[in-house]
Amino acid sequence: MNRFTKVWHPDNYQNGRKARGYFEGWYFKAVDAAGDGLAVIPGVAMPRDGHPFAFVQLNRSGGRSAWFELPYEEFTYSRDRLDLTVGRCRFWERGMTLDLAGPAGEVKGDFTFGGLSPWPVTLLSPGIMGPFRFVPFMECYHGVVSMDHSVSGTLEIDGETRSFDLGRGYIEKDWGRSFPKAWIWTQSNRFDRDGVSLTASVARIPWLGTSFVGFIAGLLVDGTLHRFATYTGARLVSIRHDENGGEFVLQDRHRRIEIAARGAAPGKLRAPVLGEMKGTVNESMCSETDVRLTDRASGAVLFEGTGRSAGLELMDPTGDLLGG
């Protein structure tokens, strides 16, 4: 698969330009039947002035994180589908196998995924970024591989074994040079009823020597994906946050979505800066996110619920989003 056709396959390894620093990472989230969450992030980093390497990092409920760094040569990938290995670990559309050992501990696991719900890809809107995916100079690109799917399997970590049977999963990915300067992100697919999943973010995006506050939100309800994004004509009505959580309101001509995330209890993850994993992300795995979707014309509530075991990242220490 060549560089051009990869635009319509955001889940695959994009293998972008390396001269200015480059990273690419996938985010596999699994929540067990009891609500305990696990995020596994495999990827590669290619610093502008350093040696490339592969990595796997983990984040668990309670803010427990772990980092495993491996030689770049132990990263392999398929050219035509999502199927990659990092050391003795494998990650693909239908599951993941973990086999890690190092100063951060020992991790073994086998997971099976079923019924993936990918973000739609069309000719002019190849995934969650819409037409911004065609822009060649973006600092960071984003893809959603599956909004919601079933998970089964077991995880053994530091001698403790956990079952993920009857669990739910979510997969996304990022690639480029660096994460944004500031952002809020929340995600949950553990609501009071099945078939509901939310992913939403607001970020300060560099653009031609300046920047703007961009946003993307997707609410999947019973097979229908309600989308709000800068490129769909929606607008950011309001935003606020503090050390415990944040809330923002988006709306377009027809609908309004209100999102309020709370209960930040973050673990510290490494994040890319010019391709080098020297930044820090504070990510909670056990937050809650309230969602309310309404029809603007009638005021009717189309959906209302609380997502539990939610991922939450609040990265705006100087308030760059609040003036957006």
Image (cartoon, rainbow, N blue to C red):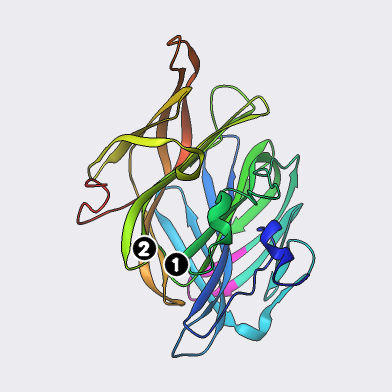
Look at 27% across and 54% down and name the residue there. 316
Give the structural element (helix, strand or loop) at label 1.
loop
Q: Main secondary structure of the magenta part?
A: strand
Residue drawn 68% across the image and 28% down it: 223
Q: Earlier in the sequence, mark 2 or mark 1?
A: 1
Q: Nearer the viewer, residue 228 or 270?
A: 228
Task: Answer few, some or many: residues within 10 Å of disc 2's Cα (few below 14, many 20 plus, some between 14 and 19).
Answer: some
Q: Which residues are magenta?
A: 101-107
Counting from the top left corner in percent of width and height, residue 93 is at 74, 54
Q: Is 17 placed above or below 313 here? A: below
Residue 282 position in % (x across, y down): 35, 56
- Residue 162 % position (x, y): 61, 48
**In this picture, residue 293 sits left or right of residue 120:** left
Q: Quadrant of the N terminus?
A: bottom right
Q: Are marks 2 and 1 in contact (CB under 8 Å)?
A: yes
Does 210 appear in magenta?
no
Taking the image as shown, residue 11 lies to the left or right of residue 158, namely right
Q: At label 1, which amino acid type do we have?
A: Glu
Residue 258: quarter of image: top left
Task: Say how many tags the image has.
Answer: 2
Nearer the observer, 71 or 154: 71
Residue at the (49%, 44%) spot, across then down: 231
What secondary structure is found at the residue carrying circle 2?
strand
| Residue 206: image tag | 2
Q: Does residue 28 sit above or below 88 in this rendering?
A: above
Q: Which residue is mark 1?
A: 139
**Is residue 312 visible in the rendered structure shown here?**
no
Closest to the observer, 16 or 242? 16
| Amino acid type shown at disc 2 | Pro
Image spot of residue 27 (x, y percent): 57, 56
- Residue 226 in sight in this render: yes
On whether residue 106 falls in the magenta region, the answer is yes
